[in-house]
Amino acid sequence: MFLGSHSISMDAKGRLAIPARIRESLMELCAGKLVITAHTEERCLLVYPEPQWLDILPKIEALPSFNKVARRTQRLLIGYATPLEVDANGRVLLPPTLREYAQLDKKLMLIGQGKKLELWSEASWATWLDCDDDDGEMPDEMQSLSL
């Protein structure tokens, strides 16, 4: 399970070092094999251990292709999906298309989301944190949640 937030850096070539605690979990879970793709609602990236991605890929593919929302979701998630592997130095090399999509620069935030991670530019993450966007109703599942 991936928890917490990690401030990390990306070099000019697009390489980023995975924090040691996260890297250890990834090595146990998937031998460092990842799939990184576009988030469908935010300008950030989703980082999946390969087995987790392989579990959800058939569900994404099964979405109705004649539904515009479903087709957009397929295009983003599958179209940007990039298999990557953590190298011997604990780094991954993000391709330019993913860096451009998420508007990533040198300073990044890696955010644990349970079975996956999100990768944000530090500036976008700070903007999201400061945003008081009430764009919808609370789902019923959250009504009884006690924190």
Image (spheres, grey):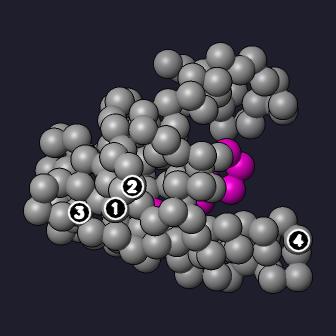
Q: CA distance from mark 1 to mark 2?
A: 5 Å
The x and y percentages for residue 46 are 50, 54
- In this rendering, which labeled residue sits more in front, label 3 or label 1? 1
Q: CA distance from mark 4 to mark 2?
A: 32 Å
Question: Camera-side residue: 65 or 92?
Answer: 92
The residue tagged 4 is: 68
Mark 2 residue element? loop
Vertical relation: 40 (above or below) 9: below
Amino acid residing under circle 3:
Val
- Region rendered in magenta: 36-42
Question: Camera-side residue: 71 or 36?
Answer: 36
Q: Residues within 10 Å of mark 2 (few under 14, many from 20)?
A: some
Marks 2 and 1: in contact by CB < 8 Å?
A: yes
Look at the image and say whether residue 38 sits in the magenta stretch: yes
- In this rendering, which labeled residue sits more in front, label 3 or label 2? 2
Q: CA distance from mark 3 to mark 1?
A: 8 Å
Question: In terms of image quadrants, where is residue 69?
Answer: bottom right
Comes first in the chain, label 4 or label 2: 2
Marks 1 and 3: in contact by CB < 8 Å?
A: no
Question: In terms of image quadrants, where is residue 80?
Answer: bottom right
Amino acid residing under circle 1:
Leu
